[in-house]
Amino acid sequence: MTTVVPTSEEDAALSVVRFASELAWADAGPEVAEPQVSGLCMEAEEFIVMGKWLELASLMITSAELVFSKVSETDIESIFTIICNLVTKTENPDEVMEIVKVITAKIIQQPNEKPAVRLKTLINLYNLLETPYCQFYVYMKALNLAVNGKVTEYIIPSFKKIDSFLKEWKIGIPEQRELFLTISNILKENKSMSKDAFKFLSNYLSTFSGEDAHVLSEAKEEAARAIVEFVRAPDIYQCDLLDLPAVGQLEKDAKYALLYQLLKIFLTQRLDAYLEYQAANSTLLKNYGLVPEECISKMRLMSLMDLTSDGSGQIPYALIRDTLQINDDEVELWVVRAITAKLIDCKMDQMHQSVVVSHPTDRVFGQHQWQALRTKLATWRGNIANVISTIQANKITEDGSQAAQGLVVR
């Protein structure tokens, strides 16, 4: 098969147009094909001479898309590398954006045809761009292509860099919402990534702080989903959902009020409250796919976390037994489960039948907890500064003494 072999940087675009048009018109016969190919090449050459990079991009991407299924992946990558490089030909950011739109529109048109190659092309395009919003635009197209083409495994590793991406993109709140929700939806399909899916869903909901009731209402369904995901997740025991207005609006909502009540039980109450709720709302739990046995297990661990936060420093085995509604011989098993899950930091005193708590663990980590943490850090910073000052003062004194001794010797 003929491959794209541009002879120089200058005629690379023409090589792509010629290569793609020859393949597209191959079945028509030379009498029909040659005039068509020549015409397209002349048009491309005019665009190059006149610096009409957007028009050239439209011409090239249309030709390239026609032969997408007829050439090897290597040739596709070569073709689209040359096409994507057109964004570097102009210094006009508006024209760059228009070129990006033309290229991405064609690439995502058939997501199920060689989706991995299409995704790689978008990533290559992203790396050629210098305008932050253009980068964000292409990244979102890549996310959607990955979903529709079922190749999300290639895009998921980039989620670890989202914080640094956000600093570069400097996008607005609506764009952040779109990004966080799209990522959360991708991750929720992978059970091993439920924790990350919940984190991005929480980030999405946090963007609604300060909004009016009308805007908040847009987040109702996702707020309800966040509650269900938190209750269901076997490895999430802390969250700040109760501090988020997007979640708070559900408290008096006709449809979701009971779901909000469930969240409040998990984050502020103990097992006995949950069992009462379960008895009265078994149908609701079933409708949301929540398994009672799993909820009880999680609530026991969260109740144990709550016992460590009362400030006493010691928890009698009997209190754990009664709170968790278990047998005497199960107490240590549940304490070990909590320690293994890193929910509590404690030691078991079997002689005195009690648990000695090293430091308490909060189920809710909201504004109050952040403020307390800031206060502690400020105190530690002050203590460290005092220690450094003392060391420096002692060093100055010591150096002065040594200097004085040197004078005496001389």
Image: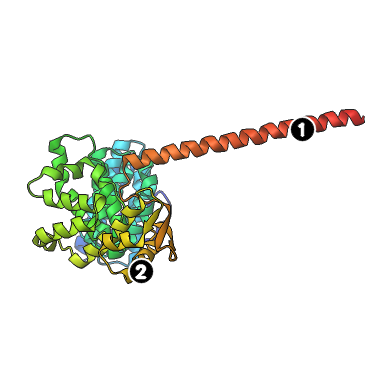
Q: Choose between 8 and 91: the one closer to the eye.
A: 91
In this rendering, position of residue 233 left or right of residue 312: left
- N-terminal label among 2 and 1: 2
How many circles with numbers are drawn on the protein? 2
User: What amino acid is found at the position of numbered circle 1 in the picture?
Assistant: Asp
Q: Position of residue 54 (x, y in %)?
A: 27, 43
User: What amino acid is found at the position of numbered circle 2 in the picture?
Assistant: Leu
Q: Choose between 110 and 16: the one closer to the eye.
A: 110
Which residue lies at the image location 26% right of the left edge and 39% below the top edge? 173
Q: Quadrant of the C terminus?
A: top right
Q: Place residue 348 in its image quadrant.
A: bottom left
Measure the alpha-carbon separation of dots 2 and 1: 59 Å
Which residue lies at the image location 19% right of the left edge and 48% below the top edge? 223
User: Which label was assigned to residue 333?
Assistant: 2
The local crowd at label 1, few if under 14, some if 14 to 19, many if 20 or more residues have their Cα within 10 Å, is few
Q: Choose between 281 and 163: the one closer to the eye.
A: 281
Q: Secondary structure at mark 1?
A: helix
Q: Secondary structure at mark 2?
A: helix
Q: Position of residue 110 (x, y in %)?
A: 20, 60
Q: Quadrant of the N terminus?
A: bottom left
Residue beneath disc 1: 399
Q: Nearer the viewer, mark 2 or mark 1?
A: 2
The local crowd at label 2, few if under 14, some if 14 to 19, many if 20 or more residues have their Cα within 10 Å, is few
Which residue lies at the image location 44% right of the left edge and 65% below the top edge? 351
